[in-house]
Image (cartoon, grey):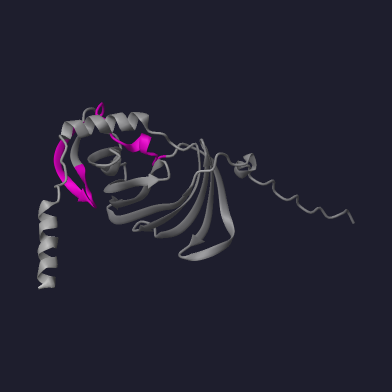
Amino acid sequence: MKGRLLALCAMLTLLGAAPMQTLDSQLVLARYEMEMSALQVPKTMIFTYNVSQLGASDIEERHVIYRSGLNVRDETIAVDGIPIKPKIVNFGHREDRYAIVRVAPRSAQYAMLFMRTVRDGAHLDYRYELTPLGAAGGFVATGLVIDGLSYLPREIDFTTASASAQGHGALVYGKSEQYWMPLYVTVEASVDGKPARERITWGDYRFPPALPASTFIPPKPLPHATLPPI
């Protein structure tokens, strides 16, 4: 008897639970534009990323990245799952190609057609189909999922094309501390007529207030030994 009462109480609780609220899709887009305009991006960060490629070239690498503005220190710490010592260090000066403020589609660039809601845990996300308003470039966003809590891009579907390759994929973002950062990207492509796949995952984010200037200065090469004249 007690078990039946508990089951009945549980059923009534479920029936009485408030349904998830679905917002008007245009209000979601307006909130999305507002949040994107106010979005803060980190000036300094440290993170790891793993890249895996199959097809035209097979790559399996793990990297640690130090970034301050445009300055980048890229340390390759493992290849094919095997740690390498000494690590391979490269220095660069470039923008973050995966930064959300660079990749996220905006209403000035795309027509956004609401398709459906997508359940995400205890809330709803909103999926849109995108159509470029101008001439398409090498990278074209084709779909957008707006997170129903932050109203920032959860997923960006895209196509990409160059002279020798065409592909499609999805970029997924999420919150790390106070920032909205890439989590992973998957791409299916054809390179010179041959199938290829790529997956990049990011993690271990840290956002220090600053990094030493020496982080981005290549070490001076050791002097060559000179034999004395005979």
State the count of labels.
Answer: 0
Left or right: 135, with 62 as reference point? left
Front-lying residue, 189 or 163: 189
Q: Which residues are magenta?
A: 97-126
- Give the residue at x 35% y 46%: 174
Q: Is residue 42 magenta?
A: no
The quarter in which the N terminus is drawn is: bottom left
For image coordinates 57% across by 57% down, the residue present is 87
Residue 109, image x, y percentages? 26, 29
> Which residue is found at the position 18% from the left and 39% from the top?
129
Using the image, determine if residue 225 lies above or below residue 110: below
Query: Is 202 placed left or right of 35 in the picture?
Result: right
Q: Is residue 172 above or below residue 40?
A: below
Looking at the image, can residue 177 be seen?
Answer: yes
Residue farthest along the front direction in this orientation: 2
Is residue 83 or residue 149 the one in the foreground? Answer: 149
Is 102 covered by the magenta stretch?
A: yes
> Residue 24's image quarter?
top left
User: Hey, which quadrant is residue 106 in on the image?
Assistant: top left
Which x, y percent locates residue 9? 12, 61
Q: Quadrant of residue 227?
A: bottom right
Quadrant occupied by the C terminus: bottom right
